[in-house]
Image (tube, rainbow, N blue to C red):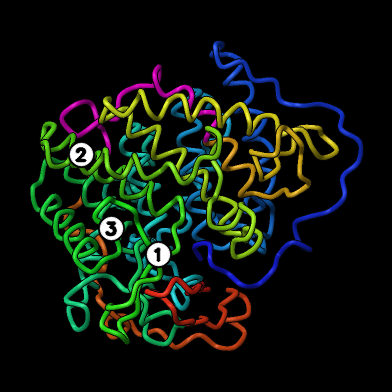
Amino acid sequence: MRGRRALAYGAAICASWGGIVGAIDLDLTSTDSIKNAAATVAFGMMSYYTGNHTGDNPGNLPSPYYWWEAGACFGTMVEYWYYTNDTSYNPSVTAAILSQVGTNEDFMPTNQTKTEGNDDQGFWGMTAMTAAEVNYPNPPSDQPQWLALAQAVFNDMVGRWDTSTCEGGLRWQIFTFNTGYDYKNSIANGCLFNIAARLARYTGNSSYADWAEKTWDWVEGVGLMSDDYSVYDGTSDTTNCTSIDKLQFSYNQGIYLFGAAMMYNYTNGSSLWKERVQGLLNNTNIFFQNGIMYEEACEQVNTVGNCDTDQQSFKAYLSRWMSATTKIAPFTSSYSLPLLASSAKAAALQCSGGTDGTTCGEHWTDNSTYDGNYGLGQQMSALSVIQSNLITQAPELVTNSTGGTSVGNAAAGSGSSDESATVIAPATGADRAGAGILTTLWLAGVLGGVLFMVTGT
């Protein structure tokens, strides 16, 4: 997963559309207009979900979308409820999330475990954490609870912290038999940092904050974060993490931004965490062109190529985390809110394609021209940035002492550090084909600036 796939999916998701019969009208001065626009885009996004169809797999998305993006999709829909109070999707969303918790109730379901990576699990864990923070309706008491699910993912990840190389850090992959096991990257460690920081704020337990600090220190120390807070993609333990892949993706910048904001809030506004939040925020500037969000690594001319299926959703996460950061670190509002507004306007203009006239395109910087590049990631990105403009009137993110109702379990999860704790056979050829596992391309040139491109599960 995670935006570095070499396999082209354009033929699967792109086609010529008929005449345009409508468009999304977005007036950012009107709450009703924003909610109506969000509802239209949400409907388009959820039309990709087939797990509630008879005979299909609950919680999963059809090809070419990977399991992690399903978790991200349902997290976006949890926020849709938070922003709009529209409950119509809640039954499907709740059922989808609970269908993927697995036997240990830690988002390690048997249908994914052979190919699941730390970041895959992390995105589902962050969805559960979001549900707890926004007081999304709790599952029935006999089902796993949102907070406990996030704690389970945290416990699993801590159990995988690997000091055998690079003096620590999480590997991209969980199991040794999967390609990418020797890659320690920002997104896997970002999931741990983000969840730990959020659990610290939600529960008040300093042990979570300690792990957030530890993860931050490792990421910074190994060079995955620069002195000016630019976040790079990853590094290989085959070189003891001495060479850094300096590709920058918006979701990496965003995941550390929101985690740092949580630590700023948890520490009652410490100057250190304020500096870190501001630094991370300042370096989101490479993901904006003339005030409009774009994926710098693949949307601009002369980059690695067109955005792949994963990357097409990345703007969703930067939008979500920038807006949520304003809620818990209000000093960021003056920078973020105007950018989210201008990006939402541009995204809405791109949502003018398809036979329905409201299908969303990818390139918001294209001067309102629908680009014909449609898919779940494009819908999710547009939905996230549009509904983020409701953040100032949305409820505060709760903790267990400020109205949070989700039940936790500090000992949740399997806590397994590797495949020896749970007997799982290596993925077969069919498994790998079905999960889209690709050969990782380890190209040199980290320090020399040559592309170091990674593909994954």
The residue lying at 26 percent from left, 68 percent from top is 414
x and y percent of residue 417 in the render? 25, 76
Residue beneath disc 3: 226
Q: Are marks 2 and 3 in contact (CB under 8 Å)?
A: no
Determine the image quadrant of residue 164.
Answer: bottom left
Q: Amino acid at mark 1?
A: Asp
Measure how far apart labels 2 and 3 are at the Cα level: 29 Å
Magenta span includes 88: no
Q: Position of residue 103 (x, y in %)?
A: 37, 66
Q: Looking at this view, name the residue that lies furthest to the front.
A: 448
Asked if disc 3 and disc 1 are in contact, CB closer than 8 Å, the reply is no
Side of 139 where 1 appears, left or right: right
Q: For mark 1, what is the residue?
A: 233
Determine which residue is flagged by label 2. Answer: 202
Please, what secondary structure does the residue beneath circle 1 have? Answer: loop
Asked if residue 410 lies left or right of residue 337, the reply is: left
Horizontal relation, residue 165 to residue 106: left or right: left
Q: Residue furthest left?
A: 206
> Magenta span has 399?
yes
**Residue type pointed to by label 2:** Tyr
Q: Residue at x 51, y 38 (%)?
A: 77
Residue type at the position of mark 3: Ser
Q: Residue at x 11, y 36 (%)?
A: 271
In the image, 307 versus 72, the foreground residue is 307
- Return the x and y of residue 213 as percentages of the image width and height: 14, 54
Q: Secondary structure at mark 2?
A: helix
Earlier residue among tags 2 and 3:
2
Percent position (x, y) of residue 268? 11, 32
Q: What separation in Å lies between label 2 and label 1 (alpha carbons)? A: 28 Å
Q: What's drawn in magenta, residue-wise?
A: 385-406
The residue at the far top in this view is 30
Indicate which label's residue lies in the foreground, 2 or 1: 1
